Image (cartoon, helix red, strand yellow):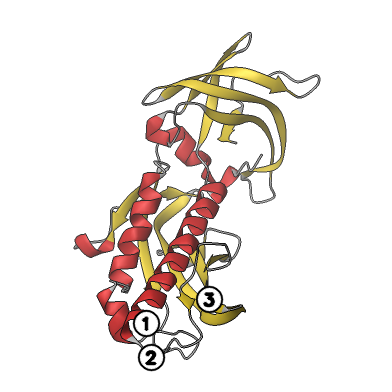
């Protein structure tokens, strides 16, 4: 079900995770494994600032997070919040850790294939702690499928400016795919959650709406957490159980109404259970 007990405080507040985006490094055009020069990257807008803006826009478009852009914030304190029961100032950073382009033969022509590997981390800047279980690494490629990748004739010159502009655009497309994959992974890891507040027959009410990242027709999994007191005196969730699945057709600002679509044998949703985006 993907239940993450560490973000229960966000459930109680009924709000989105607030984060800054930061693109640290998008690849070096002087890399001998890339087929275009630095000036082409500049012409295409392949800079850390430009790609960071695209990364933030892609995350913002999911409507699952509140996104802040460091470029337009003098004091970067908008992402300070309570997370995992401690003060947090959250930033999601991305870095291209591998980028290469190579030419493959598809007789009588040749074609450029581009690969980009992007590492993404979610960090609490107040403590330096990673909020993911390690880095999230995703791949983006362009040229593996029919209709993708710059084509070369047998007589094509790899130093031709038009060719270099085209393979620069190939790199941009591969990087965009890596960014899209990163966004999917971030949403998967930090999915919206809500608390079940009322159950009547097949109708389930949850404290969680658009302000928490839910959207109409979302499917949720109702989860029952089990906790026990640890030696340090703190309550900790040590086990969870999937109880049911439901579809939320009525999503308001803070509350949503959902319809049961299936449930585990012998189990029934009840007040106090939690719901996580499926």
Label 1: element kind: helix
Q: Separation of disc 2 and disc 1 at Cα?
A: 7 Å
Q: Position of residue 8 (x, y in %)?
A: 53, 39
* Of labels 1 and 3, the one closer to you: 3
Q: Residue furthest top?
A: 201
Q: Position of residue 127 (x, y in %)?
A: 45, 65
The front one of 29 and 103 is 103
| Residue 111: image tag | 3
Q: Residue furthest right?
A: 265
Q: Which element is circle 3 on?
A: strand
Q: Residues within 10 Å of mark 1 (few under 14, many from 20)?
A: many
Give the residue displayed 66% in from the left and 39% down from the top. 1
Image height of 277 relative to 246, above or below: below
Residue 240: give x, y in percent of width and height: 71, 37
Q: Which labelled disc corresponds to residue 164?
A: 1
Q: Is residue 69 left or right of residue 109?
A: left
Q: Residue at x 48, y 35 (%)?
A: 11
> Is the residue under label 3 in contact with that under label 1 (CB below 8 Å)?
no
Give the alpha-carbon distance from disc 1 to disc 3, as whole Å: 13 Å
- Can see residue 158? yes
From the viewer's perspective, tell me whether residue 200 is left or right of residue 173.
right
Horizontal relation, residue 197 to residue 233: left or right: left
Q: Residues within 10 Å of mark 2 (few under 14, many from 20)?
A: few
**Which numbered disc covers residue 106?**
none
Alpha carbon separation for disc pair 2 and 3: 15 Å
Can you give x and y, in whole percent of width and height, for residue 264 in the image?
76, 24
Answer yes or no: do the residues labelled 2 and 1 have beta carbons within 8 Å? yes
SS at mark 2? loop
Q: Quadrant of the C terminus?
A: top right
User: What residue does disc 2 label?
Assistant: 159
Q: Earlier in the sequence, mark 2 or mark 1?
A: 2
């Amino acid at each position: 079900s993907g239940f993450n007990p560490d973000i229960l405080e966000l459930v109680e507040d009924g709000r989105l995770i607030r984060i800054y985006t930061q693109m640290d490094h998008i690849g070096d055009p002087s890399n001998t494994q890339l087929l275009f020069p630095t000036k082409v990257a500049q012409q295409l807008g392949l800079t850390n600032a430009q790609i960071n803006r695209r990364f933030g826009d892609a995350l913002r478009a999911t409507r699952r997070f509140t996104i802040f852009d460091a470029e337009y914030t003098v004091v970067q304190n908008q992402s300070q919040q309570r997370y995992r029961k401690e003060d947090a100032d959250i930033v999601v950073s991305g870095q291209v850790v591998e980028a290469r382009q190579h030419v493959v033969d598809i007789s009588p022509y040749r074609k450029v294939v581009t690969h980009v590997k992007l590492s993404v981390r979610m960090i609490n800047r107040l403590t330096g702690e990673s909020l993911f279980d390690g880095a999230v690494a995703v791949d983006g490629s362009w040229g593996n499928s029919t209709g993708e990748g710059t084509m070369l004739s047998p007589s094509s010159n790899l130093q031709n400016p038009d060719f270099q502009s085209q393979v620069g655009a190939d790199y941009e497309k591969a990087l965009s795919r890596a960014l899209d994959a990163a966004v999917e992974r971030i949403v998967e890891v930090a999915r919206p959650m809500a608390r079940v507040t009322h159950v009547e027959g097949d109708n389930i009410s949850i404290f969680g709406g658009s302000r928490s990242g839910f959207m109409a027709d979302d499917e949720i999994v109702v989860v029952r957490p089990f906790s026990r007191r640890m030696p340090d005196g703190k309550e900790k969730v040590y086990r969870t159980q999937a109880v049911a699945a439901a579809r939320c057709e009525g999503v308001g600002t803070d509350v949503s109404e959902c319809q049961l679509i299936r449930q585990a044998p012998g189990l029934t949703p009840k007040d106090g259970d939690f719901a996580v985006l499926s």
